[in-house]
Amino acid sequence: MFLRLFTDLRAAKVPVTLREYLTLLEGVEADLAEHSVDEFYYLARATLVKDERHLDRFDQVFAQVFQGMETLQQAIEQAGIPEEWLRKLAEKFLTDEEKAQIEALGWDKLWETLKQRLEEQKGRHQGGNKWIGTGGTSPYGAYGYNPEGVRIGQDKNRNFRAVKVWDKRDFKDFDDTRELGVRNLRIALRRLRRFARTGAAEELDLDNTITETARHGYLDVKLRPERHNTVKVLLFLDVGGSMDWHVELAEELFSAARAEFKHFEHFYFHNCPYERVWKENRRRHEQQIPTWEVLRTYPGDYRLVFVGDASMSPYEIAMPGGSVEHWNEEAGQVWIERLTTKFPKSVWLNPVQQHLWNYTQSIRQIGGLMGGRMFPLTLDGLDGAMKVLAR
């Protein structure tokens, strides 16, 4: 397991050397981690990571290697058959015809039935169609199938059918230092630039200096305020879930926008904006920002740019309580309407290929709420979005 950690870190381009790996093994032999995976995490991070820019990749690799383990003894003496393989054997795989025969309960009935199951259920269930369990066709549980259900205890999407996720999920901030492709994105974003000279006169005005010196017969130095891009941008970034497939492209856009605009703020949301957003994903449960505060803080001359695949349950947009992660008192569409009313110059950039949009109901819903101002996250799409924002 320790060797796998070392090789996986190298594969993830974390610059780990053999000397640092040997130092880690010396620390383990000296019982510095005291056989706890949590303490081993801090020991490994201290010995293997030299730059904080690599902490995110280290966390991802460490989580994959030591997933589900509590002691170092488990890492050294793994079972012959991984638990994940055994779990997969219990998953139910259905044909398209069998899936079509499973009835969706609908929003109100789904929650009424879940409350009833929680009151009645006393034990673990697997492979059924009624109780909260695994590997069946019940609307509640994990590793099964239902056209509309509440996912409980499953690590990731399988069928993209859950309308609610009963688990705490952690997301990562987008990397604003990405360079691959950033140059082209920055060129596209420059359509939105509007320059003005504001502030103290600190920059040499060479033309005016030459003119005034010639006129007066002595050196007459003239200064002028520095030229700045006056356009202000609010960037709302969807993070987690199906957006994991588009992280690289979203990071490139984030990096380009941060470098291009002086007046720039960003916020994260998941799937659809609701009553709270956040600035750091690792603290999103502790340091949330009320969306009302964003509406009150920033004036209406800011350009608002949403970035997200808009791929979610339609309930997340249209229904109170529809959020996949928490109970929202007001529907997501209410908050989108509030934001676009306060910031009328707004667009939605979608990384999903445009020819696929009509196949997803939620994309059509978001496109309607944006008044048709949804653009693909491509250079041509970004060019069109900047033309709309620049009007």
Image (spheres, helix red, strand yellow):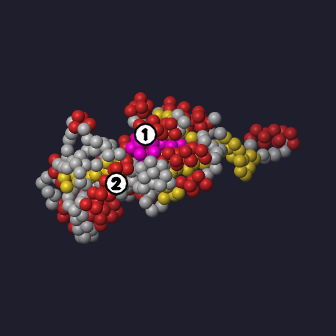
The reply to whether the magenta stretch includes residue 314 is yes
**Residues in magenta?**
303-318
**Seen in the image, is 170 located left or right of residue 224?**
left
Residue at the spot 63% in from the left edge and 35% down from the top edge:
391
Front one among 230 and 25? 230
Q: Which residue is disc 1 drawn over?
A: 362
Q: Nearer the viewer, residue 80 or 237?
A: 237
Residue beneath disc 2? 112
Q: Are marks 1 and 2 in contact (CB under 8 Å)?
A: no
- Asked whether the viewer can see residue 287, the reply is yes
Q: Amino acid at mark 1?
A: Ser
Q: Earlier in the sequence, mark 1 or mark 2?
A: 2
Query: Residue at 27% of width from left, 57% of height from top?
Result: 117
Identify the residue shown where x is 52% and y is 39%: 369
> Is residue 278 found left or right of 86 in the rendered image?
right
Report how far apart the C-alphas of labels 1 and 2 lie in the structure. 24 Å
Total marks in image? 2
* The residue positioned farthest toward the left in the image shown: 80
x and y percentages locating residue 365 in the rendered image? 46, 38
Q: Amino acid at mark 2?
A: Glu
- Residue in the picture at 33% in, 56% down: 167
